[in-house]
Amino acid sequence: MRTVDELVEEVRSFPVAERLRLVERIHEIANASADPREASLPRPKVSPLGWLADDPELADQLEKLTADARARGRARGLDDENPR
């Protein structure tokens, strides 16, 4: 059986999209509880960006991917987001 550190190292080798998909799945597992009392405990709210707090390289990759996607797309005007 592999250790958590070994798994983390393997996950770091995944493409960014696969890492983010894995994080979503882990959140699903963490939030699913067999004990109903545990499910009702308040959980801290963490944004997807907060998931990257311990991995600045991953945050940089995500920022670059976002900038690249925006550069390829059409710039939106204010009216595009809030049509009348």
Image: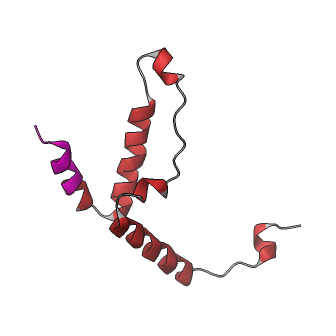
Q: Quadrant of residue 79?
A: bottom right
Q: Quadrant of the C terminus?
A: bottom right
Residue 34 coordinates in the image, percent (x, y): 40, 18
Give the vertical position of 82 relative to 45 (above or below): below
Residue occupying the point 41% across, 58% down: 53
Q: Say left or right for 53 vs 43.
A: left
Residue occupying the point 19% across, 55% down: 10
Name the main secondary structure of what is drawn in magenta: helix
Name the one closer to the observer, 22 or 6: 6
Residue occupying the point 47% across, 55% down: 50
Residue 74 coordinates in the image, percent (x, y): 63, 81
Residue 29 coordinates in the image, percent (x, y): 39, 34
Q: Quadrant of the N terminus?
A: top left
Give the vertical position of 47 relative to 58 (above or below): above
Q: Does 47 lie within the magenta span?
A: no
Residue 6 coordinates in the image, percent (x, y): 15, 49
Start-end of magenta stretch: 1-9
Name the one closer to the observer, 55 or 14: 55
Residue occupying the point 77% across, 73% down: 80
Q: Say left or right for 30 vs 3.
A: right
